[in-house]
Image (spheres, grey):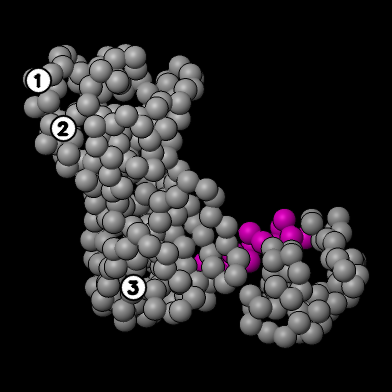
Amino acid sequence: MNLTDLSSFVAVVEQGTITAAARAQGVPKSTISRRVARLEEALGVQLLLRSTRSLTVTDEGHLLYARAQGALQEIQDAGRVVREGRDEPRGRLVVTAAQDLSSSMAFGELLVAYKRRCPMVTVDVHLDSRFVDLMTGEVDVALRGHKAPLEGGGGLMVRTLRNLVAGFYVGRDYAEQHGVPHELEEFLDHPIVAHRYSERPTLRSVQGQVCELDMSGAAMRVNDFSLVRVLVLQGLGVGLLPVLYVTDPRLVRVLPQWSAPLGRVSAVWPETRFQSPKVRIFIDMAAQHFKRLSAPLPQVVSG
């Protein structure tokens, strides 16, 4: 069995069409068709049912894909280990991240860990919450927080790094001077600092309750979680903050039984860039780093 033919078949199943598989592998459509036909002849079974309008994977094709996909990945990983052991990643890595995300300790720790792993790579970080066209070739990878699911396609790849969960926080000085809410009904009795795009968060309790909280009457609304954190630290009131962004011991959590899912953090990059060791290592490290994070959740015990 020819591994190149097998790889092209797997690409057709994953991409959905011969055209898309050819684009992903950088070869003509006729080459993909020839490889799949050659694989079918070698195995003596039909793997794909083709028509002018559709392409269907046969039962035999599904069985082969289920076994081959993992095996091919292991072969690619083995080759990657050998190449990375031979060649030290070098050059310039351009990373863009939203301003909010950049304020988290997690992002800073990732950059430090990556630089230690790839000392020959110059890391260029752009903090920008605006849309960035990754297909221009100016950016290698973008880290973004988002609510709606991000889908790959059009030459872009997406990898979810971590779900974003928020909790209610106050400054320690505020807690000592004004007390803190212990039940959700008491929350609106305190001044609120709200993120403009999270004024009506859906809350979930540890007991499984779900409710929507209306914070449209907040004392102050801003469009940056970094500023929410600063204002809460200054004693303005209670704020809803992503747990990843809370590293200052002067911030204490209130209403710890309630949290709000805000979406997720994902890495997005042009699919052609993953062939570069400097990009691939960064994305893999980001996935591992965010996955193992377990930020502490300080709580107010009195007040």
Provide the major secondary structure of the magenta segment.
helix
Q: Secondary structure at mark 2?
A: loop
Distance from Cα at disc 1 to Cα at disc 2: 13 Å
Residue visible at 33% across and 74% down in the picture: 93
Numbered circle sitting on residue 176: 1
The amino acid pointed to by label 2 is Leu
Q: Position of residue 145 (x, y in %)?
A: 40, 51
Helix, strand or loop at label 1? It is: helix
- What SS does tag 3 mark? strand
Choose the circle earlier in sequence order: 3 or 2: 3
Q: Which mark is residue 94?
A: 3
Residue 65 covered by magenta stretch: yes
Q: CA distance from mark 3 to mark 2?
A: 37 Å
- Assess whether mark 2 and mark 1 are in contact (beta carbons under 8 angstroms): no
Q: Nearer the viewer, residue 284 or 207?
A: 207
The residue labelled by disc 2 is: 236
Of 47 and 54, the residue lying toward us: 54
Please tell me which residue is depicted at 29% across the width and 68% down the height of the picture. Answer: 126
Point 12% across, 25% down: residue: 174
